[in-house]
Image (spheres, rainbow, N blue to C red):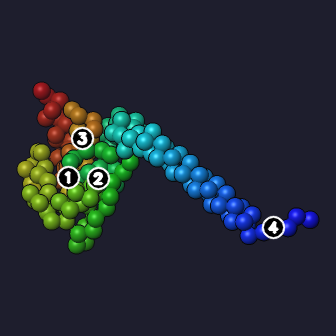
Amino acid sequence: MKKINSKNKTKIRLESKSRTRGLLLLGGIIVIAAIALYGPQLNSKSIPEVINYSSFEGEIIPDSIICMVRGDIKSKGSLPIQIGAKTYYGCCEKCLLKLEQNIDNIQYAVDPVSGQTFSKADAIVRQDPQDHKRVLFFKSDETYDQYLKLINKK
């Protein structure tokens, strides 16, 4: 049997520490390379949308997939915010803040036909027939039907 002296123990410890540092460095390099390669793709706006916008024609659109600030349909859904007894939806924290503070009276919409002002949380949300990614807020189904008649006459 070989006898291990203190010099050999020190040499073994140094080799082990060196190997560990090398593996940590290699792991760090791999993580940085992965972030550099795939990070931009994760935050890219070129991610294909999964919504078939034509599927909403004539249908009431659920509030949970629209941004009540921007007035558009979101492919990944929206974030809810409870304000009093009503629930509003925004696509990001900035939109939620605008809704919460009611900046520019954003919690309310004006019916395109009747001209009445009402809460977006109470609205009948329909797809804009002229821009399928956008929505219009209506006070009732009746005003939506009147709107369709008006735009189809043109």
Residue 10 visible here:
yes
From the top left corner, tell me how far across and down residue 90 is, in percent.
27, 55
- Name the foreground residue: 134 vs 75: 75
Task: Spot the residue most to the right.
Answer: 1
Q: Taking 1 as reference, is 142 above or below it?
A: above
Give the mark nearer the N terminus: 2 vs 4: 4
Marks 3 and 4 close (CB-CB < 8 Å): no
Q: Amino acid at mark 3?
A: Arg
Q: What residue is pinned by disc 3? A: 134
Q: Report whether residue 16 is seen.
A: no
Q: Can you say which quadrant of the picture contains the C terminus? A: top left
Marked residue nearer the N-terminal end (3 or 4): 4
Amino acid at dot 2: Cys
Q: Give the class, few, some or many, for how many residues have Cα within 10 Å of label 4's Cα (few <14, many ≥20).
A: few
Q: Could you tell which of marks 2 and 1 lies nearer the N-terminus? A: 1
> Marks 2 and 3: in contact by CB < 8 Å?
no
In the image, what residue occupies the spot 51% across and 51% down?
28
Q: Earlier in the sequence, mark 3 or mark 2?
A: 2
Q: Nearer the viewer, residue 114 or 95?
A: 95
Q: Which numbered mark, 3 or 1, is in the foreground of this view?
A: 1
Asked whether disc 2 touches disc 1, contact meaning CB atoms under 8 Å apart, the reply is yes
Residue with the mark numbered 4: 4
Regarding mark 2 in the picture, which secondary structure is present there? Answer: loop
Residue designated by label 2: 91
State how far apart marks 3 and 1 are (Cα).
11 Å
In this view, the residue in front, 152 or 121, is 121
Query: Which quarter of the picture shows residue 117?
Result: bottom left
**Which label sits on residue 69?**
1
